[in-house]
Image (cartoon, rainbow, N blue to C red):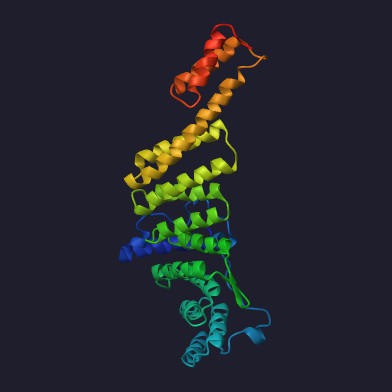
Amino acid sequence: MRLPLFALSVVIAAVCSAQSHSDPAFDSGRYATDAYPGFDDFEENTTPQRKTPRWFSFFTGPECDSASEQMKYCKELLAEESWSDAVDELDALVRAWPSSPEAPQAQLMLAETLERKEASYEKAFKEYRYLVDFYSLQVDYNAAADSMYRVACTLKIEGKKLVFFRFDNNVDVRRAFEACVLRAPGAKWVPSAMLMIAKLREDEGQYIEAIKVYENLRNIRFGEAEAQTALVREAAARMKVLSKFGYNRDRIRDTLSFLESAQRSASQESRVRISSYLSEVRALLEEEDYLAAKFYDSRMRTGRSAISAYEDFLMKYPDGVHSEEVKARLEQLKKGNVK
């Protein structure tokens, strides 16, 4: 099966960079082909498309007849601070001569101009992403990936611009952070990016997907500070799932199992909050087990079944909330009072 172009380029760039610079951005050995549960199968992150000349290229194409002349013209526009025209002409260069030596530089200049001069952060992010996807071997890959992350953080603050208005757009921002992680999975900012991705999932009410991201972060960055943060946030998200989807014994037991494991690996500070969740879940499980035992105490069932169910309950919860009530009823049943 063929790898997507950007995935192959990420692997090659990562290996080359690691060999030549020993850069920590790629020390983890994880690449864009690795699975990231909780991430969207977003087309721009999985199958990016190359730029092609625009329609009506007579009007929208490059001003000059060669890539070198076009680059010189673009630099003149930048020197004149004609930012909008420079953006159009830099883009035209990349589209008309994508394999030229000038194309990677033009693509970088395009992204930088959109970010620093035009403050068009959504467009800037897309152009940095294009730079990483298609010119990973011709540019400083790590610097380009860092630029992607920087702009993604700005998008989180600025929101989405529509005409003259800005508004939150969690889905696009989350996918931007996902794009960053997929393209530089060993970068130092990845744990922070993944925490943001999971938080945005929670803001969307997608707690199960958020849990997947928290769990993956804990696995790939075990021992780091962000992994502890992910542990506590995952516990909180699991409690929300428990509440949102209703209580049943299997879900409660799964949550209890996670919390007990989390309690053992949590920091001292984190254990306080997890302990409160544990108390809540154990109370829920006791209530579910009590209702299950009481189910056998009916006219439709034998006294022996009820006695057995209540005895099992007392073995689990000898000092529980319902223990005195169950003991009294058990005594009645053993005396033959089964009404």
**As displayed, is residue 234 above or below residue 246?**
below
Q: Quick one: which residue is furthest to the top in this view?
A: 335
Residue 222 image offset from top left, x and y in percent: 36, 48
**In which image quadrant can residue 260 be found?**
top left
**As displayed, is residue 206 above or below residue 156?**
above
**In which image quadrant can residue 277 be found?**
top left
Residue 140 image offset from top left, x and y in percent: 39, 71
The answer to which of 38 and 33 lies nearer the viewer is 38
The answer to which of 274 and 217 lies nearer the viewer is 274
Residue in view at x 64 percent, y 16 percent = 298
Residue in view at x 55 percent, y 15 percent = 329
* Residue 2 visible at all: no
Residue 312 image offset from top left, x and y in percent: 50, 18
* Residue 206 visible at all: yes
Looking at the figure, which quarter contains the C terminus?
top right
Residue in view at x 47 percent, y 37 percent = 280
**In which image quadrant can residue 16 be found?**
bottom left
Residue 304 image offset from top left, x and y in percent: 57, 10
What is the number of callouts on the image?
0
Residue in view at x 54 percent, y 77 percent = 120
Q: Is residue 27 left or right of residue 55?
A: left
